[in-house]
Image: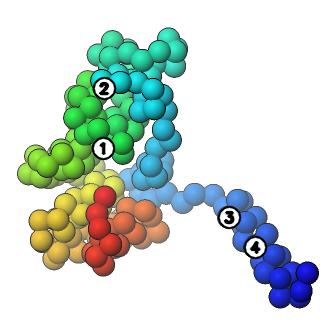
Amino acid sequence: MTPHLKRFAALAVFAGLSLGLSAPVFAAGEETDETAPPPKTETTTKCKDGKVWDKKKKECVTPEQSGFNDDDLYKAAREFAYAAQYDNAIRVLTLASNQNDPRILNYLGYSNRKAGRMELGMGYYKKALQADENYILARSYMGQALIEQGDVKAAKVQLVEIRDRGGENTWAYRSLLQALNGYGTY
């Protein structure tokens, strides 16, 4: 191995170890990193017709019969939303007992926006921010919706709000910044 290749290999190993040992950083308003795409489960890989995977029963069930708590419903809906099954996501989200949970409101906004119901989606983003003004993921998705509507100035306001609320090193900030730079929206 040439000295150049040895150095490159050593740097690659060091970089891999550094990445592997680093802990995720979360912003104010977030308890977990819900900005990364959720792992695919049987809900979107095996279940059909909007059914969700019930781990206890080990089968696909209708969301109404699942007995899931709000967190489980949220996770299933989020998975549907990322799989572009927006109406299934909305159906699951409407089953949550706490309809004022900013996570539920945010994904109602996201799913409606992506399904072509922009104004309804924007209304849900606003409700999410009324429930938690520090919920930076709702600010990011709202900013991306504003870009889609051609209101770049208002989207920049949301970017500044995310930064000022401690979210500069988050996916929520980076994705809105990328959208402002013309790389598309989520």
Spatial CA span between label 3 and label 2: 37 Å
Mark with earlier residue (3, 4): 4
Q: Position of residue 8 (x, y in %)?
A: 78, 81
Q: Check whether the beta carbons of the residues at disc 3 and disc 4 lie within 8 A of each other.
A: no
Instruction: Say which amino acid is labelled 2.
Output: Gly
The residue that label 2 is drawn on is 50
Q: Residues within 10 Å of mark 3 (few under 14, many from 20)?
A: few
Tag 4, which secondary structure?
A: helix
Instruction: Say which amino acid is labelled 3.
Output: Leu
Give the foreground label among 1 and 3: 1
Does residue 163 lie above or below 93 as drawn?
Answer: below
Mark with earlier residue (4, 2): 4
Tag on residue 84?
1
Q: Is residue 167 visible?
A: yes
Give the foreground label among 3 and 4: 4
The residue that label 4 is drawn on is 12
Spatial CA span between label 1 and label 2: 12 Å
Tag on residue 19?
3
Mark with earlier residue (1, 2): 2
Q: Is residue 54 left or right of residue 118?
A: right
Total marks placed: 4
Instruction: Say which amino acid is labelled 1.
Output: Ala
Query: Residue at position x 40%, y 24% from top?
Result: 47
Does residue 153 lie above or below 53 as drawn?
Answer: below
